[in-house]
Image (cartoon, rainbow, N blue to C red):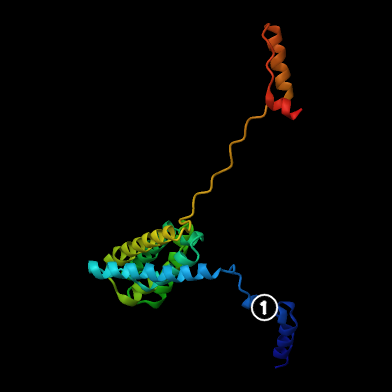
Amino acid sequence: MLGANVLWVGFLQDKRYKEGSLRHYFARHQPKAQPRQAVLAGIGGVVGIGLVAVISVLSGNPLLIAPFGASAVLLFSTHDSPLSQPANVVGGHFIGALTGLALYALLPGAWWAAALGVGLAITLMTFLRLTHPPAGGNPLVVFASDPSFGFLFTPVLLGSVCLVGTACLYHRLTRVPYPRRLEAGPPPKQAQISQPQVKQAQLGQAQLGQPEVNHPEVSRAQ
């Protein structure tokens, strides 16, 4: 009992657990959004999920799964994030669903296999640079609903493509840049000619009776 009290006192006196440090757990690190930006994000979620639902009804194919709601948050609220780009949304959902279906075929009904599916999906998405957080729920959907292998294509693949297409159209209409453009690399460096090399070349030209050639790179360096 005495040892437990000593540990508790030490816990309270530890600088990492002082009252001021609790603010870190409640701090909001997300940048402040303008009212118009917040409203447009909400309307985008309505339009995105709504259009996919309409396509689902008209085509007779179920295209909506629960993780698509989380994808809509990223697509319309944090559209500039690397996790919200088209390749990440479609590729991430595909990887998550494929991982879940593969493990469910080998280990049907095992709770630890569902957890393994989530972890393996995270590993594959990270390795392939296609991380999309909502896709981590796809293995859980597979283990909870017992779908066929066609689940990979409908609703996962087709539904995610429709959702991304809707997001692209919506952002274009609202003049929001999406998807992110590839960043241009640095311009290639020009070769620098050293001063001894220039003098040696001028000496050789003088011996051959040719006029001397001035090199602007060295002139600017001087």
Residue annotated with mark 1: 23
In screen coordinates, is 202 left or right of 34?
right
Q: Is residue 71 above or below residue 13?
A: above
Mark 1 surroundings: few (<14), some (14-19) or many (≥20) residues within 10 A: few
In screen coordinates, is 152 left or right of 213?
left
Q: Taking the image as drawn, is residue 20 in sight? A: yes
**Label 1 amino acid?**
Arg
Q: Taking the image as drawn, is residue 106 in sight? A: no
- 179 vs 70, nearest the viewer: 179
Residue at image location 43% in from the left, 65% down from the top: 121
- 114 vs 219, nearest the viewer: 219
Quadrant for the C terminus, please: top right
Residue at image location 34% in from the left, 70% down from the top: 50
Q: Is residue 90 above or below residue 195?
A: below
| Picture coordinates of residue 6, whole percent (x, y) | 74, 88
In screen coordinates, is 124 left or right of 103?
right
Quadrant for the N terminus, please: bottom right
- 31 vs 218, nearest the viewer: 31
| Picture coordinates of residue 155, whole percent (x, y) | 31, 67
